[in-house]
Structure formats: structure tokens, C-alpha cells
Image (cartoon, rainbow, N blue to C red):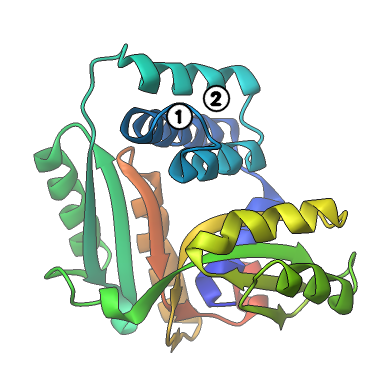
Amino acid sequence: MSGHSKWATIKHKKGKTDARRGKLFSKLSRAITVAAREGGTDPNMNIALANAVEKARNESMPKDNIERAIQRGGGGADGVAYESIVYEGYGPAGVAIIVEVLTDNKNRSAAEVRNIFSKHSGQLAQPGAVAWVFERRGSIVVDGAKYDEDDVMAAAIDAGAEDVVQDGDSFQVLTEPADFAAVRDALVAAGIEFEQADLTMIPKNTVKLEENDARKTMKIVDALEDSDDVQEVYANFDIPEDVLEALVG
């Protein structure tokens, strides 16, 4: 896994404060509402909605919250028109960063994202400047201490997964976006639980960071993730797991 994937897994295991979880639920709700509005309220017919709902469930978002978000999308009850925007830039040590935003005010979002990059030794770039570094993939992370590699491999590959990569005490199952739901469901059917399951951006190459640059990079990514309009942040840094643990802790 890339350093960013490992970092996300560590933070997921440690959990979040109530304040951060409340902000996370707000973002998840917004993503569900937009997906339902754009593609319909039936997750079986709307893969974007199905993925948004699955992500919300993985974060323990209450069922009532999920259903209300779907209803808002179906009926347009809140009257808010959200726009999807992608920003690209560089962090400390030349780390490539992609920021996905859902906003009702693109000028506000642009100013906030630009300010975060500037404040944390980063730089916004032109569209396409760093997008080539990443590929859209399904990513499912399984605890390697609980499950045998052969069992994970058999269930995943038979269902259409591209690869199963071991990293430390975890397995990362990689899929094409179109195969993500089938592979995820096959793991569930095989009795294999997962720690994360997302459509994500996987870097083709990574930038290995020492502790000082790692600390700076985590600050800029944390600041971006804390922004109300930011849905996802992807970066191609690679940090040793012991350094990640120490910094997150």
C-alpha cells in the first residue's frame, strides 16, 4: 500500500473524536445526497450511491442518517446545488496531491484550498499536472492477522480482483472500478471482513519521506481533510509504518 493508504488505515483503527466524526458524517451525507440526486435513489442501479452508502456504513454512520440523505437526493428537499471540483497540487518534498471537493460555493472552496496549500509549504498546480500519477481503483483492506493470504486471494481473484498485495499485517485487494462491488461482495460471502473498502486513487509511483517532511505532509493533508467542502484527499507519499504510527499517535 502507499503511505497514504497505510495512514488512512491507522487513523481508521484509532477512530475519531466526536467533533471529527460529526464532520465526517456531514461529508458522507453530502456525498450520498449528490449521488442519489444524480443517479437515482436505488443503490442497485446507482453504483456511485452504492459506494457512498457502503463507505458511510463502514464509518458506522447511523442507518437513519443514510436514509435521510438518500431521500434528500431523491426529492431535492434541501434546495442546495453542489458542484464537484478536483484540485491538484504539490506538498512538501514534491508529493503529488489530488483534492476532491463537493461545494455549493466554488469561490469559497478555491480560496480555502489555495490557502491551505500556501500555509503548509504546498503549491496548487494546473489541471492534469499530477492526475497522471494516479489510477482509479477499488481498494479493499483486510487484516492479515485474522485471515490467511490464500483464502483472501482465492475469494478476491475468483471474483475479478486485479491483485492482492501484502503490506505489513494487512492485505490490500485491488480491483478495476467496475469490479469493485463484485469483489467486495465475494469477500463478504466468503466470511472475510475488511477494514476499508473504497473506490480510490492509487499512485503509480511514490515519494519516500523522512520524518521531517512526513510531519509537514501530514499537516497539509490533515488540514485539507478538515475542510468542510473536501470529500477526499489522495497523495503519493510513502512513510515507514513506524514513523506513521508515531506521528498519528
Of labels 2 and 1, earlier in sequence is: 1
Q: Is residue 181 above or below residue 247?
A: above
Is disc 2 in contact with disc 1, using a CB cutoff of under 8 Å? yes
Q: Please state the horizontal and vertical placement of residue 208, each as a whole percent of the image.
A: 47, 88
Residue topped by disc 2:
66
The kind of secondary structure element at disc 2 is helix
* In-front residue for pair 247/226: 226
Q: Position of residue 38 (x, y in %)?
A: 31, 34
Which residue carries the number 1 mark?
29
Which label number is shown at residue 165?
Answer: none
Amino acid identity at mark 2: Ile
Residue 6 picture location, percent across and down: 61, 69
Quarter of the N terminus within the rendering: bottom right
Residue drawn at point x = 88 percent, y = 54 percent: 191
In this image, 124 relative to 153: left or right? left
- 153 or 2: which is nearer to us? 153
Q: Residues within 10 Å of mark 2 (few under 14, many from 20)?
A: many
Instruction: Report the amino acid beneath label 1.
Output: Ser
